[in-house]
Image: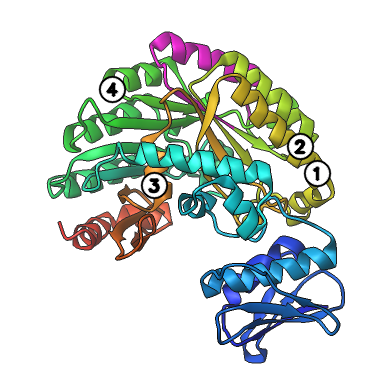
Amino acid sequence: MFEVILKGHDKYYGVSDVVRMFFGVPEELKDEGKVVAPEGPDIRITNELLPDGRSVTYSEDKVYEFEGGLLEPGREIKRSLYLALSDITSQRMPWGCLTGIRPTLVACEEEDAKALEDKYFVRPDKAKLAFETSREEQRILSLVPEESLCIYVGIPFCPSRCEYCSFISSDISCHMDRLVNYEAALEREISLIASSIKRPVSAVYVGGGTPTVFEEKEFASLLDCMFLNLNITPECEVTVEAGRPDTITDGKLLAMKDHGITRICINPQTMRSETLLKLGRKHTAEDIVRVYRKAEDTGFDLINMDLIAGLPYENADEHVKSTKRLIELSPANITVHTLYKKRRASISREQVMDLYKTRGELDNCVAESYDLLKEAGYRPYYMYRQKDTGHGLENTGFAKGNTGSLYNVAMMSDARDVLSFGAGGMSKRCFKQEGEKHKHRVERCPTIKDALTYIERVEEMAEKKIAFFGM
Ligand code: SF4
């Protein structure tokens, strides 16, 4: 059994994060002062924070310590632990000892990409990616006034559930009756809160789930309600995650165009039809192309398309082929995700962890996709990582020119307030901290996740948010 004894500190979370990258999700045995990995060699090591702020990690016969400038304790303990695990396993992680979901936040603090390599052992290509992306994120964030509000409208329903999905989404084949009531509840919540909003709205994101899962009548009614009640100016970015082509009709495309939706997402995930069908998506790659062309013909020039690298039922190189097909379509934004496993997905952890065996292959394919996108004129504009990706990679949004999404950057930055409507939404307020240029203190206000309970308690949810924002 692989064990890490904590000494001189109680940063279980940080220790677990580093152990997880090498040996899977560990157990924190706080009574015994240790973290135990589910896999790995039969070794016990100690991770110690010394009184002078340095950290050392040691086994019976070896000591690991970073020689250079000190970091804050949380980062220091990860650094010496990473050195130890990297030596024990002979593995280096693409992001070195950075375990947070926003490496660009660390990159913001640095003068150049090389500092990420030297201080955190980040691989040169990832250091460059984080550094470049952090600068573009800052540029986009500067376009979102600090006092403005971002709005999220959540629709946690989908036409069917994709096997890999980790989002809270209900398959409408089981919940047809709830859709109409849910849409009405959303309108109720929007109208209850809207008059209290006295701040400018800079970006709106209608996401899910699949917002286009509503019938045309309900879908148009929701857009009416949003544009009537929320202070959406012509300058405001308004995205609808149309998501699945099997839910996008001519009527819904026209409704979006007429209402002034500025950006839509049509997400193939892969352009291999066989994989799509096995994943439970009930549409083909050709359906994606057909709907994409229709959206272009309707007048949408700002379309995002998502891909996922590392899907089951296909080899990693299929992802490169999918990237090439999207580049041919030439949407303004392409977002490259890497598969990760969360508790709610029906795909097994083993299927995802299988990627460990092909980590190098997947890593190369993602790098190749990035190169192809850059050659085609796309630049990274936002990125984030998720725990338990298995392969330690990241998700990166690419954009042509200045088309990067304000909402995506503002939301991920944790530097702008977000008001969330709908079941499962998370509203947040972000407060500047003294001495911190980029990091904000965040207060969160969750909404009930279950759609049925949300419908029943929508007034209470609205009141809670009005109080949370002090409106
Ligand atoms: S991946 Fe998207 S479309 Fe598929 S179930 Fe999840 S939220 Fe719905």
Q: Are marks 1 and 2 in contact (CB under 8 Å)?
A: yes
Asked where in the image residue 135 lies, by quadrant, the reply is top left
Q: Is residue 287 above or below residue 350?
A: above
Which percent across, then down, holds residue 290? 56, 13
* Image quarter of residue 149: top left
**Mark 2 residue element:** helix
Residue labelled with disc 3: 411
Q: Quadrant of ligand 1?
A: top right
Residue highlighted by disc 2: 364
| Circle 2: residue type | Asn
Secondary element under disc 1, as helix, strand or loop, is helix
Left or right position of 359 against 257: right
Report if the CB atoms under discs 3 and 2 are less than 8 Å apart: no
| Residue at the spot of label 4 | 260
- Which residue is disc 1 drawn over? 360
Neighbour class for label 3 at 10 Å: few (<14), some, many (≥20)? some
* Near-viewer residue (455 or 389): 389
